[in-house]
Image (tube, rainbow, N blue to C red):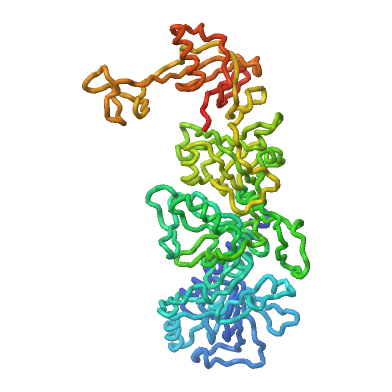
Amino acid sequence: LCRGGLAERLCRLQNRERSAISFWRHQCVSDNTILSDKSGVLIVKILEIFEECTIQVAICQQLEQSPVALSPEDAVINAEEPILKVLFTRETAAHLKSRPQDVIHIYPPWQKLLLQNADVPVIMNTYFSQKVLLSEHSEAREKTYGLTKMLIRKNIISLAQTFRLDDLDDNLHQESTDNQVPCAPQTNNNGDSKRHPLAQSAVNDSLLEMVESQGAVGWREVQVRVIIQRVYCLPAKEGYRSHTQGNKPLCATAVANSDPPNVRLCLLVQDAYGMFSEVQLQSLSSTDDIEQYCRRWEGKSCCLAGMKILQRTTRGRALGLFSLIDSLWPPVVPVKVPGQSQDSEMMTTNLPPPSFCYILTVQSGEIHVEVDEEEQISNLYQPPAVHGLKEILQIGGCNKRCSFWAQVFYRRLQTKPSVPTDQREMLLFVTDSSLQNVVHGIPKVVAVSITASCVLSVEIIEALSAGSRFVFFKDALWGNGRIICVERTVLLLQKPLLCSAAGADLSELTGPVRLDELDSTTQANSVCALRGTVVGVNESTAFSWPTCNRCGNGKLELCPQDRELLYCNQCSEVVTTPVLKMQLEVFLSCPSRSQSTVKVKVWHEMTLFVLLTMLLFLQTYEVQSVLGREVGLLNCYVHSITSHPNCVVLEEIVLL
């Protein structure tokens, strides 16, 4: 909070207020008597109680006095006094535990509010209130009532009713016993437990209204209908994981170990008013399940119940979440707008984007999500807009979500010794027909960075290890000339059934992948094609090592029985004919980088290595015999490019 600002002053005022209330209640408990100072004390008898917008409203009759010897039923009522409507906050109501016929003393500074066109005055600022027990009969009754549950009617006030809209839905605003919730802990009831928890609950269409009316502790007897815009996985918080067993409710439990997968299924939902919320559900037994959830749930409507607010986040705190929300804004169809008539067609292009979002999670022992998979796709659903890579590279701005269908032809793990293996980033080099057909000006391939927060399914990892594959990148992040897969990005092996192609060419490549040749525009951590003339071989850094001819193990040991033979621990056998592998550094002269020293690291079985080895063997290992030889085109990964000295370091690679 800003020092001396209004927020800081309000926070201090609230802290002093809570301290004063706590001290006053402690004093009442210590004295164990009714406070003797009666000046300005308002004495009321409760006739009826209900709850509205988290505030407990008590319809009361004012009393002239509170006789010491009489029970509350015999208390004198002044018929001339008007009925009062007394407001209690949730904390005060929980402290009083009031019931009809109770007598309450309300101490200053209470305030009376007179409303226009209303005959019943409203009593506010009732923090200093005390329930009066006037006899042993009342104390016995209090102990008996404490063991039973009492239902308090909860009035659900919709935003449409608040703003006096014309097309009110009476079904949402009925004040019936279906909306009653217990104000005391419920005792087990065999008859009630057999009923479906959501069978008699009210259905709403506003997330914000549910938060306002139900509060942060959770929604129990009400539901809200939303549309599932996206399904994805997020890494579960360290030390905690939610799990499910069959159709049993979900609950959060401590994780003893970090066995994969430690990811949680999440939904990005949107209500009829355009408000978004992220719902965090159970952890998946397999990350491969994410593809089937995307196909089954995205675009369908669902009812949320048994939710609690995990966090209220804003744009500044969750840039990744709001970049995804911005890609779904404005809505494709008109949404309800509080304060306006729903009869007229409203323009959705001028609506401001959401500035906050509630993160919801399931409560233990509650039924949480009911998805109607048989229902048709909602008109509010926005499928991913698929673009060609050429079009994405021309998008201005940063932190823009994009989806594309591309061929992955090379992958490389970013090896940093200080970073754990499971937190290292990976580079995927991709291309599509829109880039391969470009003559010049735009690169033929693009590097996609996969961050550690992006959850990859086992199916994707195995497919990329097996060979080149076409992959659908859904909701990747584009900015500052880079495509990054972050949290809430999903990689699929198949194109979604519903997607907006927007003229993009989704056809697969028929020929081999062509790379850009090394030139002055080539950057580090990219791939390129290389051609040039051999001008030198770095003999000082060349080395070789024997490998097993059966399994390829490069860590052979001396045989314990015969120190002249090699032994493979993986095969548990003696290696009689090891395969010799080498590494060389070769210097090339390239016309496209005539002012630079081009150094290429080549490995055993690479094209350049085989060529040089053959020439060296024919010339009895004379290095002069390979100088001046032309090589290319070689597929290379660019490690670094420096200007002082002017040097380009590459490594020959094999494409998938």
Q: Position of residue 49 (x, y in %)?
A: 57, 81
Establish if 423 lies above or below 150.
Answer: above
Observer-nearest residue: 494 or 157?
A: 494
Establish if 300 lies above or below 181.
Answer: above
Q: Position of residue 316 (x, y in %)?
A: 64, 49
Q: Could you tell me which residue is drawn at 57 percent across and 69 percent down?
A: 223
Quarter where residue 166 is shown: bottom right
Judged from this view, the residue extending furthest toward the front is 510
Whether residue 217 is visible, yes or no, is: no
Q: Position of residue 22 (x, y in %)?
A: 52, 68
Observer-nearest residue: 560 or 58?
A: 560
Is 249 positioned to the left or the right of 526 in the image?
left
Establish if 455 lies above or below 362.
Answer: above
Quarter where residue 574 is shown: top left
Is 194 positioned to the left or the right of 358 in the image?
left
Whether residue 404 is visible, yes or no, is: yes
Q: Could you tell me which residue is drawn at 71 percent across and 63 percent down?
A: 335
Q: Position of residue 53 (x, y in %)?
A: 62, 72
Query: Across the whole image, how many numbered discs are drawn on residues?
Result: 0
Q: Could you tell me which residue is drawn at 43 percent across and 19 percent down?
A: 582
Establish if 369 lies above or below 570.
Answer: below
Observer-nearest residue: 126 or 295?
A: 295
